[in-house]
Amino acid sequence: MKILLIGSAACITALIATAWLMTFAKWFPIKAVDSFVIDYKTMIRAHVDYALMALFGVGFYGSGVELPVIACWCVAIGGFSNPTVFTIAAFDPNFWSKPLWKAYTALSFVVSSVGFIWIAYALAMHAIS
């Protein structure tokens, strides 16, 4: 279950990185950064998603419920890869039309969905029993 904390730490690190990128892209005229962040609104989506995924990981870990290890891995991997979809899209204006990124996005959504549903089930079963 500690993988949830590692996944949360990765999301927190990405959260801070996106905050700095957005700060430089918006408030400081640095051409290299300004040209790097193409879609500022999508970067905000990534930033918020990293925060939510970090909170989910910490919350699931802190619930005190023994959770299935594979489900925890799915949440940790999917929880980081989902916001990364938005991060990459913020750098690439043609992101949504590229087959590689479509496959990455679909795989990320499947992995995270499996993990979240599995953990939701485990939490519900713990509450019922």
Image: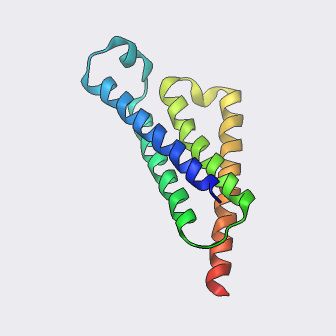
Query: Whole-percent x and y of residue 127?
Result: 61, 83
Residue nearest the observer in this picture, 48 or 55: 55
| Colour scheme of the rendered structure | rainbow
Residue 129 is at least partly visible in this image: yes
In the rendered image, the quadrant that contains the C terminus is bottom right
In the rendered image, the quadrant that contains the N terminus is bottom right
Residue 7 located left or right of residue 122: left
Query: Whole-percent x and y of residue 113?
Result: 66, 56
In the image, what residue occupies the spot 74% across and 57% down? 70
In the image, what residue occupies the spot 72% across and 65% down? 68
Query: Whole-percent x and y of residue 83?
Result: 53, 42
Q: Quadrant of residue 98?
A: top right
Is 52 above or below relative to 121?
above
In the image, what residue occupies the spot 51% across and 64% down? 59
Farthest top residue in view: 31
Residue nearest the observer in this picture, 76 or 91: 76
Farthest bottom residue in view: 129
Residue 85 located left or right of residue 112: left
Query: Whole-percent x and y of residue 99?
Result: 70, 28
Is 20 above or below relative to 107?
above
Residue 46 is at least partly visible in this image: no
